Image (spheres, helix red, strand yellow):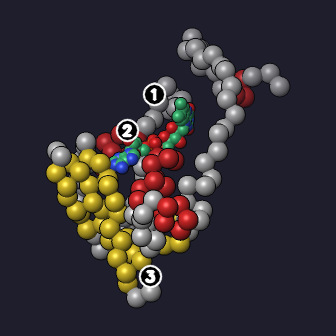
Amino acid sequence: MTPDTRERSYSATAYYRPNSDRPNLVLLTDAFAKELIIEKEGSEWVAKGVKFLHNREEHVVKTEGEVIVCGGSVQSPQLLEISGIGNPQILKAAGIEVKVDNPNVGENLQEHMNKSYLSFPSKTSTALSDVPQ
Ligand SMILES: Cc1cc2nc3c(=O)[nH]c(=O)nc-3n(C[C@H](O)[C@H](O)[C@H](O)COP(=O)(O)OP(=O)(O)OC[C@H]3O[C@@H](n4cnc5c(N)ncnc54)[C@H](O)[C@@H]3O)c2cc1C
């Protein structure tokens, strides 16, 4: 929340809009990442791109730079696992070739405590320092 404008920040306002005119930025909506392209370089597997669906067609985009996975707390590990990165026991059971053995993938999701609360707009601006201790 931005205190002076009382606007809620989200990825479009915080990251996309300030950078939308960059010539090296393309935002493709309604695209679904199916798999990371991971290739062997020497003894290491390196992420080289992504296979994705757009308008029901499959595409592959490759990069010499980094691949950033940001599918959220459930689908990020799922995408890693589908791509061969994860716990060998889980991957093998799903018939997925193990490329990177990492048993931590998808293992640390935790429920956080839930609580009920009420929120309402204040007629006057109140800072935390105004609240009696
Ligand atoms: C009910 C609720 C209330 C919350 N309230 C707050 C709050 O008040 N304050 C706060 O700071 N945090 C809050 N959070 C947590 C906050 O929403 C998350 O921490 C934050 O959204 C995580 O951002 P992210 O970009 O990592 O993932 P997400 O916001 O989950 O974004 C992941 C995106 O990837 C997309 N995606 C997934 N898989 C694929 C795929 N294969 N191909 C293409 N796209 C894909 C999804 O559709 C989604 O749009 C709340 C969460 C929930 C569920």
Say the numbered circle drawn on residue 7.
1
Q: Residue at x 63, y 16 (%)?
A: 118
Query: Does 119 sit left or right of 57 as displayed?
Result: right
Label 2 environment density (alpha carbons within 10 Å; few <14, some 14–19, many ≥20): few
Q: Is residue 55 above or below residue 65?
A: above
Query: Does 57 sit left or right of 98 as displayed?
Result: left
Q: Is mark 3 within 8 Å of ligand 1?
A: no
Q: Earlier in the sequence, mark 1 or mark 2?
A: 1
Residue 6 in percent (x, y) is at: 49, 25
Q: Amino acid at mark 3?
A: Glu
Query: What residue is disc 2 on?
Result: 13
Q: Nearer the viewer, mark 2 or mark 3?
A: 3
Q: Amino acid at mark 1?
A: Glu
Q: Are marks 2 and 3 in contact (CB under 8 Å)?
A: no
Q: Is residue 44 above or below residue 68?
A: below
Q: Amino acid at mark 2?
A: Thr
Give the camera-side residue of 76 and 28.
76
Label 3 environment density (alpha carbons within 10 Å; few <14, some 14–19, many ≥20): few
Q: Quadrant of residue 60?
A: bottom left
Q: Quadrant of residue 111?
A: top right
**Mark 3: which secondary structure?**
strand
Q: Are marks 1 and 2 in contact (CB under 8 Å)?
A: yes
Say the numbered circle drawn on residue 44.
3
Q: Residue furthest bottom?
A: 42
